[in-house]
Amino acid sequence: MIKILHVSDLHFGPPFLENVAAALRREAFEHDPDLIVASGDFTQSATAGEFAQARDFLRSLPPKPMATTPGNHDVPFLAPLRGIDPFGRYKEHLNPLLDEFLRVGDIWCACLNSTSRWGSLLDGYVRNHQLEKCRRFFADSPEGALRIVVAHHHFVAPPDIEGRGAMRGARRALDRFTEMGVDLILGGHKHRGYIGNSLDFYSGKDRRQGAIVVQCGTSTSCRGRYREKEKNTYNEITHDREEVRIRHFMFFHDAGGFRPISEHTFARGELDTKEVKVENKEVKVESK
Protein backbone atom coordinates (compact mmCIF):
# COMPACT_ATOMS: atom_id res chain seq x y z
CA MET A 1 0.00 0.00 0.00
CA ILE A 2 1.19 3.50 -0.90
CA LYS A 3 0.86 6.31 1.65
CA ILE A 4 1.25 10.04 0.96
CA LEU A 5 1.24 12.94 3.46
CA HIS A 6 -0.05 16.17 1.91
CA VAL A 7 0.60 19.51 3.64
CA SER A 8 0.34 23.05 2.31
CA ASP A 9 0.55 26.77 3.06
CA LEU A 10 2.94 26.59 6.01
CA HIS A 11 3.43 30.39 5.95
CA PHE A 12 6.59 30.71 8.01
CA GLY A 13 6.64 34.25 9.36
CA PRO A 14 4.12 36.08 11.58
CA PRO A 15 1.16 33.72 10.81
CA PHE A 16 3.13 30.55 11.64
CA LEU A 17 1.94 28.48 14.64
CA GLU A 18 4.77 26.61 16.33
CA ASN A 19 2.57 24.37 18.49
CA VAL A 20 0.60 23.21 15.45
CA ALA A 21 3.82 22.56 13.55
CA ALA A 22 5.14 20.46 16.44
CA ALA A 23 1.99 18.32 16.32
CA LEU A 24 2.26 17.98 12.54
CA ARG A 25 5.88 16.88 12.82
CA ARG A 26 5.02 14.27 15.44
CA GLU A 27 2.14 12.89 13.40
CA ALA A 28 4.18 12.81 10.21
CA PHE A 29 6.43 10.22 11.85
CA GLU A 30 3.38 8.25 13.00
CA HIS A 31 2.01 8.13 9.45
CA ASP A 32 5.38 6.98 8.05
CA PRO A 33 4.52 8.06 4.45
CA ASP A 34 6.22 6.92 1.28
CA LEU A 35 6.07 10.48 -0.10
CA ILE A 36 5.52 13.92 1.46
CA VAL A 37 3.86 16.57 -0.73
CA ALA A 38 4.10 20.24 0.26
CA SER A 39 2.06 22.35 -2.17
CA GLY A 40 3.44 25.87 -1.84
CA ASP A 41 3.38 29.04 0.26
CA PHE A 42 6.19 27.97 2.56
CA THR A 43 6.68 31.60 3.62
CA GLN A 44 4.58 34.67 4.28
CA SER A 45 6.87 37.32 2.77
CA ALA A 46 9.55 35.29 0.93
CA THR A 47 12.37 36.52 3.15
CA ALA A 48 15.61 34.57 3.44
CA GLY A 49 14.93 33.99 7.13
CA GLU A 50 11.46 32.57 6.49
CA PHE A 51 12.80 30.24 3.81
CA ALA A 52 15.53 29.04 6.18
CA GLN A 53 12.91 28.25 8.81
CA ALA A 54 10.79 26.40 6.26
CA ARG A 55 13.83 24.42 5.10
CA ASP A 56 14.70 23.41 8.66
CA PHE A 57 11.12 22.33 9.36
CA LEU A 58 10.91 20.19 6.23
CA ARG A 59 14.23 18.57 7.12
CA SER A 60 12.81 17.70 10.55
CA LEU A 61 10.03 15.62 8.97
CA PRO A 62 10.52 11.90 8.22
CA PRO A 63 13.45 11.37 5.82
CA LYS A 64 11.27 10.40 2.87
CA PRO A 65 11.08 11.68 -0.72
CA MET A 66 9.47 15.11 -0.84
CA ALA A 67 7.56 16.83 -3.64
CA THR A 68 7.40 20.63 -3.45
CA THR A 69 6.16 23.49 -5.60
CA PRO A 70 6.34 27.26 -4.94
CA GLY A 71 3.33 29.41 -4.08
CA ASN A 72 2.56 33.05 -4.69
CA HIS A 73 3.82 34.01 -1.20
CA ASP A 74 7.18 32.46 -2.08
CA VAL A 75 7.84 35.26 -4.58
CA PRO A 76 9.23 38.52 -3.08
CA PHE A 77 6.58 41.19 -3.19
CA LEU A 78 8.79 44.19 -3.93
CA ALA A 79 10.99 44.97 -6.93
CA PRO A 80 13.77 44.69 -7.90
CA LEU A 81 14.18 41.17 -6.49
CA ARG A 82 10.74 40.12 -7.70
CA GLY A 83 11.66 41.11 -11.24
CA ILE A 84 15.30 40.01 -11.27
CA ASP A 85 15.24 36.69 -9.39
CA PRO A 86 11.70 35.90 -8.18
CA PHE A 87 12.36 32.27 -7.29
CA GLY A 88 15.99 32.59 -6.20
CA ARG A 89 15.34 32.12 -2.49
CA TYR A 90 12.97 29.22 -3.06
CA LYS A 91 15.56 27.48 -5.24
CA GLU A 92 18.39 28.22 -2.79
CA HIS A 93 16.64 26.97 0.34
CA LEU A 94 14.02 24.44 -0.79
CA ASN A 95 14.30 23.09 -4.31
CA PRO A 96 16.44 24.11 -7.30
CA LEU A 97 13.69 22.89 -9.66
CA LEU A 98 10.48 24.84 -10.28
CA ASP A 99 8.91 21.97 -12.24
CA GLU A 100 9.91 18.60 -10.82
CA PHE A 101 9.04 15.06 -11.88
CA LEU A 102 9.49 12.30 -9.29
CA ARG A 103 9.13 8.54 -9.32
CA VAL A 104 8.72 6.85 -5.95
CA GLY A 105 7.84 3.21 -6.45
CA ASP A 106 4.42 3.16 -8.14
CA ILE A 107 3.98 6.92 -7.58
CA TRP A 108 4.59 9.17 -10.59
CA CYS A 109 4.39 12.77 -9.40
CA ALA A 110 4.57 15.93 -11.55
CA CYS A 111 5.05 19.17 -9.61
CA LEU A 112 4.17 22.25 -11.68
CA ASN A 113 4.96 25.86 -10.80
CA SER A 114 1.65 27.71 -11.18
CA THR A 115 2.87 31.17 -10.20
CA SER A 116 5.05 33.75 -11.96
CA ARG A 117 7.12 36.81 -11.22
CA TRP A 118 4.43 39.37 -12.16
CA GLY A 119 1.09 38.02 -13.25
CA SER A 120 -1.02 35.07 -12.17
CA LEU A 121 0.08 35.42 -8.56
CA LEU A 122 -3.47 35.19 -7.23
CA ASP A 123 -5.28 32.85 -9.61
CA GLY A 124 -2.33 30.90 -10.97
CA TYR A 125 -1.57 29.54 -14.42
CA VAL A 126 -0.05 26.37 -15.88
CA ARG A 127 1.57 26.87 -19.26
CA ASN A 128 1.42 24.72 -22.40
CA HIS A 129 5.07 23.70 -22.19
CA GLN A 130 4.48 22.44 -18.63
CA LEU A 131 1.55 20.33 -19.80
CA GLU A 132 3.70 18.92 -22.57
CA LYS A 133 6.41 17.98 -20.07
CA CYS A 134 3.70 16.24 -18.03
CA ARG A 135 2.53 14.32 -21.08
CA ARG A 136 6.01 13.05 -21.85
CA PHE A 137 6.58 12.12 -18.21
CA PHE A 138 3.36 10.17 -17.73
CA ALA A 139 3.70 8.50 -21.14
CA ASP A 140 6.43 6.31 -19.63
CA SER A 141 4.39 5.32 -16.56
CA PRO A 142 3.26 1.67 -16.41
CA GLU A 143 -0.29 0.45 -16.04
CA GLY A 144 -1.37 0.66 -12.40
CA ALA A 145 0.95 3.56 -11.56
CA LEU A 146 -0.54 6.33 -9.41
CA ARG A 147 -0.23 9.52 -11.49
CA ILE A 148 -0.25 12.74 -9.48
CA VAL A 149 -0.11 16.43 -10.42
CA VAL A 150 0.85 18.96 -7.75
CA ALA A 151 0.37 22.73 -8.15
CA HIS A 152 -0.11 25.45 -5.59
CA HIS A 153 -3.15 27.06 -7.21
CA HIS A 154 -6.47 25.30 -7.65
CA PHE A 155 -7.82 23.77 -10.86
CA VAL A 156 -11.30 23.65 -9.30
CA ALA A 157 -12.72 25.98 -6.65
CA PRO A 158 -14.28 24.69 -3.41
CA PRO A 159 -18.03 25.37 -3.31
CA ASP A 160 -17.88 28.19 -0.78
CA ILE A 161 -15.09 30.23 -2.43
CA GLU A 162 -16.29 33.78 -2.99
CA GLY A 163 -15.35 36.06 -5.87
CA ARG A 164 -12.81 33.87 -7.67
CA GLY A 165 -13.03 30.61 -9.51
CA ALA A 166 -10.27 28.29 -10.64
CA MET A 167 -6.91 29.26 -12.11
CA ARG A 168 -6.72 30.60 -15.66
CA GLY A 169 -6.77 27.83 -18.25
CA ALA A 170 -7.98 25.25 -15.74
CA ARG A 171 -10.39 23.52 -18.13
CA ARG A 172 -7.75 23.17 -20.81
CA ALA A 173 -5.39 21.65 -18.23
CA LEU A 174 -8.06 19.27 -16.88
CA ASP A 175 -8.74 17.98 -20.40
CA ARG A 176 -5.03 17.33 -20.86
CA PHE A 177 -4.71 15.62 -17.49
CA THR A 178 -7.62 13.33 -18.38
CA GLU A 179 -5.86 12.35 -21.61
CA MET A 180 -2.74 11.56 -19.57
CA GLY A 181 -4.64 9.36 -17.11
CA VAL A 182 -3.89 11.57 -14.10
CA ASP A 183 -5.43 10.09 -10.94
CA LEU A 184 -4.88 12.85 -8.37
CA ILE A 185 -4.52 16.64 -8.45
CA LEU A 186 -3.09 18.08 -5.23
CA GLY A 187 -2.96 21.76 -4.26
CA GLY A 188 -3.51 24.45 -1.66
CA HIS A 189 -3.67 28.26 -1.90
CA LYS A 190 -7.21 28.92 -0.63
CA HIS A 191 -6.52 27.84 2.98
CA ARG A 192 -9.58 25.62 2.83
CA GLY A 193 -9.48 21.89 2.25
CA TYR A 194 -11.65 20.23 -0.35
CA ILE A 195 -11.80 16.66 -1.68
CA GLY A 196 -13.89 15.65 -4.70
CA ASN A 197 -13.76 14.91 -8.41
CA SER A 198 -13.01 17.27 -11.28
CA LEU A 199 -16.20 16.12 -13.03
CA ASP A 200 -18.22 17.87 -10.30
CA PHE A 201 -16.99 21.17 -11.74
CA TYR A 202 -16.19 20.53 -15.38
CA SER A 203 -17.49 17.58 -17.39
CA GLY A 204 -14.84 18.05 -20.06
CA LYS A 205 -14.35 16.14 -23.28
CA ASP A 206 -13.98 12.74 -21.59
CA ARG A 207 -16.41 11.96 -18.78
CA ARG A 208 -15.31 8.40 -17.99
CA GLN A 209 -13.47 9.18 -14.76
CA GLY A 210 -12.11 12.67 -14.22
CA ALA A 211 -9.41 13.22 -11.60
CA ILE A 212 -9.59 13.14 -7.82
CA VAL A 213 -9.06 16.67 -6.50
CA VAL A 214 -7.36 16.96 -3.11
CA GLN A 215 -7.02 20.50 -1.78
CA CYS A 216 -5.27 21.15 1.54
CA GLY A 217 -5.94 24.03 3.90
CA THR A 218 -3.16 25.84 5.72
CA SER A 219 -1.30 23.23 7.75
CA THR A 220 0.58 25.48 10.20
CA SER A 221 -0.67 29.08 10.08
CA CYS A 222 -3.51 31.16 11.55
CA ARG A 223 -4.80 32.07 8.08
CA GLY A 224 -7.48 29.40 7.58
CA ARG A 225 -10.51 30.57 5.60
CA TYR A 226 -14.15 29.78 4.86
CA ARG A 227 -15.26 26.64 6.70
CA GLU A 228 -11.67 26.21 7.94
CA LYS A 229 -11.36 29.74 9.31
CA GLU A 230 -8.53 29.78 11.87
CA LYS A 231 -8.20 26.01 11.45
CA ASN A 232 -5.25 23.86 10.35
CA THR A 233 -5.48 20.78 8.16
CA TYR A 234 -3.52 18.18 6.21
CA ASN A 235 -4.36 15.09 4.14
CA GLU A 236 -3.32 11.46 4.29
CA ILE A 237 -3.67 9.59 0.98
CA THR A 238 -3.43 5.82 0.65
CA HIS A 239 -3.58 3.70 -2.49
CA ASP A 240 -3.84 -0.08 -2.88
CA ARG A 241 -4.23 -0.22 -6.71
CA GLU A 242 -8.01 -0.72 -6.47
CA GLU A 243 -8.93 2.32 -4.39
CA VAL A 244 -7.63 5.71 -3.32
CA ARG A 245 -8.54 6.76 0.21
CA ILE A 246 -8.12 10.26 1.59
CA ARG A 247 -8.40 11.22 5.25
CA HIS A 248 -8.68 14.92 6.01
CA PHE A 249 -7.15 15.88 9.38
CA MET A 250 -7.85 19.04 11.42
CA PHE A 251 -6.00 20.42 14.45
CA PHE A 252 -7.93 20.61 17.74
CA HIS A 253 -6.40 22.63 20.57
CA ASP A 254 -8.25 20.67 23.27
CA ALA A 255 -6.91 17.42 21.88
CA GLY A 256 -3.41 18.83 21.39
CA GLY A 257 -3.16 17.41 17.90
CA PHE A 258 -4.80 16.62 14.57
CA ARG A 259 -7.80 14.34 14.24
CA PRO A 260 -9.48 12.96 11.06
CA ILE A 261 -12.72 14.80 10.30
CA SER A 262 -13.67 13.12 7.00
CA GLU A 263 -12.78 10.09 4.90
CA HIS A 264 -13.20 9.71 1.13
CA THR A 265 -12.87 6.55 -0.96
CA PHE A 266 -12.57 6.53 -4.75
CA ALA A 267 -12.33 3.44 -6.95
CA ARG A 268 -9.80 3.58 -9.75
CA GLY A 269 -10.83 2.89 -13.33
CA GLU A 270 -13.29 4.22 -15.84
CA LEU A 271 -16.74 5.04 -14.52
CA ASP A 272 -18.51 3.44 -17.46
CA THR A 273 -16.71 0.09 -17.25
CA LYS A 274 -16.22 -0.52 -13.54
CA GLU A 275 -18.46 -0.59 -10.52
CA VAL A 276 -17.40 2.29 -8.30
CA LYS A 277 -17.51 2.34 -4.54
CA VAL A 278 -17.65 5.86 -3.14
CA GLU A 279 -17.62 6.53 0.56
CA ASN A 280 -17.69 10.02 2.06
CA LYS A 281 -17.85 9.46 5.78
CA GLU A 282 -17.91 12.18 8.40
CA VAL A 283 -15.84 11.28 11.46
CA LYS A 284 -16.88 12.34 14.93
CA VAL A 285 -14.02 13.91 16.85
CA GLU A 286 -13.87 13.86 20.62
CA SER A 287 -11.42 16.07 22.48
CA LYS A 288 -9.29 14.60 25.20
Image: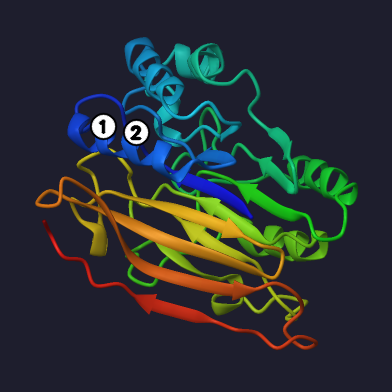
Name which residue type carries label 2.
Arg
Q: Nearer the viewer, residue 266 or 40?
A: 266
Around disc 1, counting alpha carbons within 10 Å, would you say few (fewer than 14), some (14 to 19), or many (20 or more)?
A: some
Check if mark 2's residue and mark 1's residue have beta carbons within 8 Å: yes
Vertical order, 156 against 52 (above or below): below
Q: Which residue is mark 1?
A: 22
Q: Which residue is mark 2?
A: 25
Q: Position of residue 75 (x, y in %)?
A: 45, 25
x%, y% of residue 223? 23, 44
Comparing 171 with 10, the one in front is 10
Tell me residue 20's x, y (percent): 23, 38
| Res 67 visible | yes
Write down the quadrant of residue 229 in the picture: bottom left
Task: Classify 10 Å Cα crowding around label 2: few (below 14), some (14-19), many (20 and above).
Answer: some
**Alpha-carbon span between mark 2 and mark 1:** 5 Å
Image quarter hosting the N terminus: bottom right
Helix, strand or loop status at disc 2: helix
Residue, x 69% and y 44% (percent of image)?
109
Residue 156 appears in the picture as rendered: no
Which one is in front, 195 or 244? 244
The amino acid beneath tag 1 is Ala
- Residue plotted at (64% across, 39% down): 111
Under tag 1, what secondary structure?
Answer: helix
What's the residue at 25%, 38% (across, down)? 221
Residue 3, image x and y in percent? 57, 50
**Quarter that holds the C terminus:** bottom left
